Amino acid sequence: MSKTIPLAEAKKSLSSIVREVEEKYDRFTITKNGVDKAVILSSEEFDGLLETLDILSCKEERVAIARAKKQVRSGKTVSLKEFKTRLKLK
């Protein structure tokens, strides 16, 4: 859940904000004079966003993702059981 709070409130409630971010994956937008100035989110979520940006910035990765999506849509998939069986044959 995303919440918007003024800087003064964020200062008073920083411990509880960090707890909510860590436990509930809430996000907080901090405003100053009614203008968005900062966002607080979990470090795990931040790392995930950076990883996503890294993947999407690489053309080869985007092509591989598009190819995989096309394969799924056309039914060219295997079950986990079948995949494990194939691995044992090699």
Image (tube, rainbow, N blue to C red):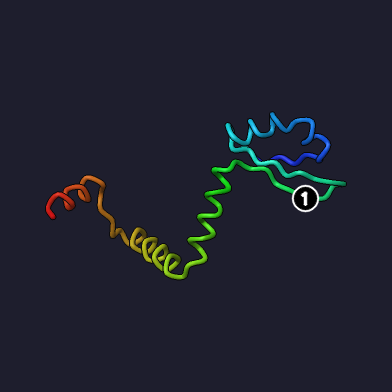
Return the residue found at the far right: 33
Residue 42 spot, x, y in % from top left: 60, 41
State the residue in front, 26 or 50.
50
- Name the residue tied to disc 1: 37
Residue kind at label 1, given as amino acid type = Lys
Q: Residue at x 69, y 29 (%)?
A: 16
Secondary structure of residue under mark 1: strand
Residue 72 spot, x, y in % from top left: 35, 58
Quadrant of image for the N terminus: top right
Is 43 left or right of 61, judged from the image as shown?
right
In this rendering, the answer to whether 24 lies above or below 80 is above
Q: Residue at x 48, y 67 (%)?
A: 58
**Local crowd size for mark 1, using a 10 Å CA cut-off: few (<14), some (14–19), many (≥20):** few
In this rendering, the answer to whether 11 lies above or below 30 is above
Quadrant of image for the C terminus: bottom left
Tell me where residue 75 sits by quadrant: bottom left
Is 63 left or right of 71, judged from the image as shown?
right
Q: Residue at x 58, y 48 (%)?
A: 46
Residue 20 spot, x, y in % from top left: 64, 32
Return the residue found at the far left: 89
- Counting every numbered tag in the picture gives 1
Residue 84 spot, x, y in % from top left: 20, 47
Is 47 left or right of 89, judged from the image as shown?
right
Tell me where residue 71 sits by quadrant: bottom left
State the residue in front, 51 or 28.
51
Q: Residue at x 73, y 48 (%)?
A: 38
